[in-house]
Image (cartoon, rainbow, N blue to C red):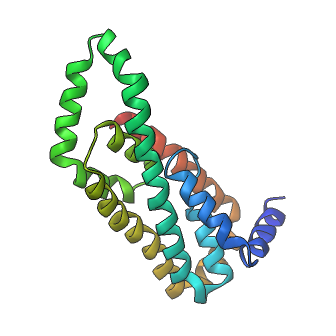
Amino acid sequence: MLRRLYARMIALSASPNAPWWLVAIAFAEASFFPIPPDPLLILMALARPRRAWMLAGICTIASVAGGALGYLIGYALFNEIARPILATYGYGEKFAAFQATFAEYGVWIILFKGLTPIPYKIVTIACGAAAFSFPKFMAASLVTRGARFFLVAALLRRYGEPVRDFIERRLTLVTCGIAAGVVGGFLLLKVL
């Protein structure tokens, strides 16, 4: 069953509409969707290796645009809903400390967490909640998301066929690894 699904995904990844799916998933993942666009980017780059750079660019732009929506969610909804609740329970000062930390280290937080399996939507929403500088947020997001997706593209352009062979021979292991990365990102977020 897993092999049939993989074969179907490879076929769909080579279709003319596939980049639109990449746009939708990269945009949604940066603001509210739990699954990262990397698996789709990998499949699409494996299906059409010559388009890897273009796909990484599409993924980067869509992810940064989705990050702007995540920022808006954190900024608008946090101030309207969460801030009064925090104040009611006496956590207003702790949030002020969080904002101060973000004001000082925000760019580094964005750059670090944007490259890790920590869900990027958490970073985008936190930036909005902390009222972090929007231009700095967008610039750091462009750097970190671009670095991540273009690194994937570069590796697949260089090692595409061996990677495809590895995935096809160890499909269950790769699928479990991706699932573990997503779950691990959420768990790592709880620890940090």
The answer to whether one can see residue 36 in this image is: no
Front-lying residue, 84 or 120:
84
Q: Is residue 99 above or below residue 165?
A: above
Screen quadrant of the N terminus: bottom right
At which x and y percent is residue 67? 44, 53
Q: Horizontal placement of 69 versus 110: left or right?
A: right
Q: Is residue 65 above or below residue 11?
A: above
On the rendered structure, is 188 left or right of 91? Answer: right
| Of residues 73 and 168, the one drawn nearer to the viewer in this rendering | 73
Q: Residue at x 35, y 42 (%)?
A: 128
Q: How many marks?
A: 0
Choose between 12 and 176: the one closer to the eye.
12
Residue pictured at 62% horizontal, 59% vertical: 24
Residue at point 35%, 17% (across, down)? 84
Specify the quadrant that holds the C terminus.
top left
- Residue 6 percent location from the top left of the image: 76, 66
Q: Name the residue: 41% across, 64% down.
A: 145
- Whether residue 155 is visible to the viewer of this picture, yes or no, is yes
User: In x, y percent, where is residue 81?
Assistant: 43, 23
Vertical comparison of 127 with 4: above or below: above
